[in-house]
Amino acid sequence: MTATGADQDAPGVGARGWWWWERRRGAVLDGGLAGVSAVECAAEGAAFAERAGTPLAVGVLFGFVVGSVLLVRRRWPVTVVLVSIAVTPAEMGYLMGIVGLYSLAASEVPRRITAVLAGMSTVAVFVVTVVRLRQDVAQADVDQQDFDPSGWYVPVVSAFMTLGLNAPPVLFGLYIGARRRLMESLRERADSLEQELSLLADRAEQRAQWARQEERRRIAREMHDVVAHRVSLMVVHAAALQAVALKDPQKAVRNAALVGDMGRQALTELREMLGVLREEAVPAPASGVPLAAVGRAAAAAAEAAAGDGGEGEDRDGPCLDAVEALCEQSRQAGAAVELVVSGEARRYAPEVERTAYRVVQEALTNVHKHAAGAEVVVRLAHREAEVAMQVENGPSDAAVAGARLPSGGNGLVGMRERVGRLGGVFVAGPTDAGGFRVSAVLPTAPAGRSGPGVPPVASVDG
C-alpha cells in the first residue's frame, strides 16, 4: 500500500535505517501513537479478560500487541483498520480505529476499498454500542424501577456515538489526502513550467546565437563585396598605371584619378557600414533592471532579427540603377563590358535590387581576378514576377598579364547564399567556349525565406 499521513513512503528510505518513514519526526509520531494505543488496548484487554474469565496477563499482552499495530499505519493502513474492526467486539482499540480510519482515508488506497472498510468499521462500532447500551439500560432498569426508556433511545444514541467516532477521522483524512494530491499536482506543474521556461530560455539563446552568426555572415558578405570589387579595380588600374606611366603620362594621370575615386568610394561604403553597426549597438541594461526582462528583450530582439530576414542590410544600399555605373567602372579598368537590358525596368523591393546588384558586382570582380582581358556581357531581364541577371565572359586573353589578385573562394558561396535567402535560383559554371557564366533569378516578391529562429540550409558552391 502507499504511505499515508504527513510523510509518504519513499522507496529506499529503509536503506537509511528509517524503514518507510522519510523523516525522523514521522517515526517519532507513529511510535508515540503506537505506545499510547498499546497502553490503552492493554488496559481494555485487562477489562475484557476479567469479563471473559481469562488470565489477566493474557488480556494485557493481547491488548498490548493489538495496540502496537498502529505503528504500521503509514505502510499498511488497511491492516490497521481490519485489526481495529476485529477487536471492536472486545471493546478495545478506539484510538487505533480513529487513527486507522484517518490514515486509510488520507492514503492512496482506492476509494471503494476505503468506503467498504469505513462501512464495516461503522457497523461494528454501531453493533457493539447498541449491545453495550442495552446492557446498561437493562442494568439501570433493574436498579431504578422508575427509569423507563423508550424504544428509540438506544439506536439513536448508538448512531450518534458511532458517527462521532468514525465520521470525523474519515472526513479529515479525505481532506488531507485531497490537499496532498493538490500540492503534488501543483508541484509537478511548477516543475514542468520550470522545465518549459528552461527550454524557452535555451531556444531564445539559440535564436540569439543564430542571429549573431547571421549578422556576422552578412557583414562578411558586405565587406567582401565592398573590398573585393573596389580593391580589385584599384589593383587593375594600378597595373595599367605602371605600364603606361612613361609612355602616356596623360593616361597615367587618368588612371591615378580613377584609383583615387575608387579608393574614396570604398572608404565611403565602409564608413557607412560601420556607422550602421554603431547605430544598431545594443545599450547595456541599466542597474536595477531584472535579468528576466533583459532575457526577454534579448529573445525578442533575436526573433525580430531572425524574422527580418536580413532586411536591415538593405537600407541605403545600391540598386539596379547603379548597374550601368558598375559596368562603366569596369570599362574604365580596360575590360570590354556590354550591358543588355530587356523588359520594362521598374522598382523592386530593396533587398531584391541590392542582391541583384551584388551578384553583378561579384561576377565582374571575378572576371577582373581570373579572366583579365576577356569580353563580358551583362544581361538584365525584367520579367513579370521575377528579375534575372547573367554575367558571361569569354576566354581570357593570354597576352594580358594577370593582376595576381588573391581569391578566398567565397565569392560564389556568398552569391548563392544571397539569392537562396530570397527564394531565388543561382547557377554558375564554365561555358563551352572556355569562359564562365553566372546566372541568377530573383522573385520580385521574395519567398522561401527561413522562418524566425530556423537557420537557412547551408549552400554548397558548385
Image: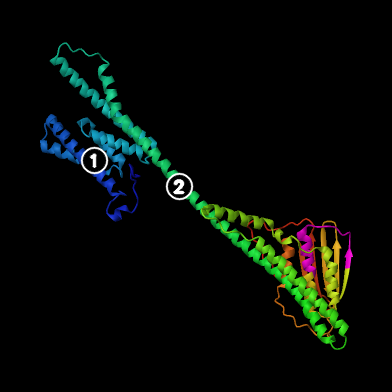
Q: Nearer the viewer, residue 299 or 283?
A: 283
Which structural element holds mark 1? Answer: helix
SS for tag 2?
Answer: helix
Per the image, the residue denoted by label 1 is 33
Q: Residue furthest top?
A: 146
Amino acid, disc 1: Leu
Which residue is at 15% across, 18% downward? 139
Look at label 2 and name its amino acid: Glu
Residue 217, placed above or below residue 141: below
- Return the x and y of residue 376 as percentages of the image width and height: 85, 74
Indicate the position of residue 338 as horizontal and vertical percent values.
88, 72
Query: Residue 213, relative to residue 92: is it above or below?
Result: below
Give the left or right position of residue 273, taking residue 13 as reference: right
How many residues crowd around disc 1 within 10 Å: few (fewer than 14), some, or many (20 or more)? some
Residue behind mark 2: 188
> Quick check: 304 left or right of 52?
right
Q: Alpha-carbon neighbours of circle 2 within 10 Å: few (<14), some, or many (≥20)?
A: few
